[in-house]
Image (tube, rainbow, N blue to C red):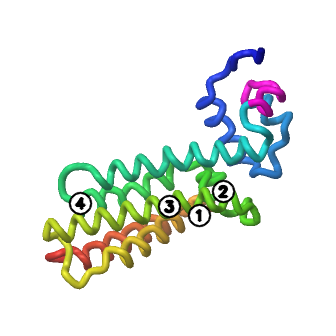
Amino acid sequence: MPRPKTFDHQQVLEKAIEVFRRKGFNGASIPELTSELGICRQSLYNSFGDKRGLFQAALDHYGKGEVQAKLDLLGAAGSPIENLRTFLRGWAALAAQCPGEGCFTITAIIVNRDDPEALTTVEQQVNRLENAIEENLKRAAEAGELKPDASPARLARSLTTSSYGIGLLSRLPDSAARIGDTVAEMLELVDRAALGG
């Protein structure tokens, strides 16, 4: 009869995110992972299969939390356009708070570019965000907040691409001014599409 788990699954994934964020997949050794996660090697294998399974679980966990918070903001009650503006302004603050190693989704894109499974997970996260922005803009159009000739799909794609670009540049030191200017341009793009903009 297998012994019951004696660790908090979510807490282990949070710690794994921090290790993989710092070291990447290849740089994080099993001894380092078990030490920092506070679990034994056998528990890691029993719960996640192997290091790749742990990485994939950590990436999935991070993406769901990261994207869901943004989806909640975009879908909140009130003006869709104002919700979108609030979401975009938040990128400057998020980039400033993000550790120097960069956000985990961006780390996964960079260090796991030859890992189809990891890239598929990231692509799903990016698509979820892009779809949420597009839905937000469609609601804005229905509420009479968007110009008739504005394209929710194209605008959503542009804003999503810029957002993840900000996530990438947050890895660079002293990038606050560059990120601030980019957010300002994103807001201007929305203002030009908004009715009365």
Q: Which residues are magenta?
A: 37-46
State which quadrant residue 147 falls in.
bottom left
Q: Which mark is residue 122?
A: none
The residue under the point 56% across, 59% down is: 170
State the predominant SS element of the stretch in magenta. Answer: helix
Badge 4 marks a residue whose secondary structure is helix
In terms of depth relative to the viewer, which is nearer, 11 or 56?
Answer: 56
The residue under the point 73% across, 60% down is: 112
Badge 3 marks a residue whose secondary structure is helix
- The answer to which of marks 4 and 1 sits earlier in the sequence is 4
In terms of depth relative to the viewer, which is nearer, 21 or 71?
Answer: 71
- The kind of residue tagged 3 is Ala
Kindly give the residue lying farthest to the bottom in the view shown.
149
- The kind of residue tagged 2 is Thr
Instruction: Give the residue pinned by disc 3.
Output: 176
Distance, label 1 to label 3, CA atoms, is 12 Å
Q: Which mark is residue 80?
A: 4
Q: Is residue 49 above or below residue 133?
A: above
Q: Nearer the viewer, mark 2 or mark 3?
A: 2
Quarter of the image with the C terminus in it: bottom left
Residue 63 in the image, given as x and y percentages of width and height:
54, 50
Distance, label 4 to label 1, CA atoms, is 27 Å
Q: Which mark is residue 107?
A: 2
Mark 3 neighbour density, 10 Å: few (under 14) some (14–19) many (20 or more): some
- The kind of residue tagged 4 is Pro
- Mark 4 touches mark 3? (CB < 8 Å): no
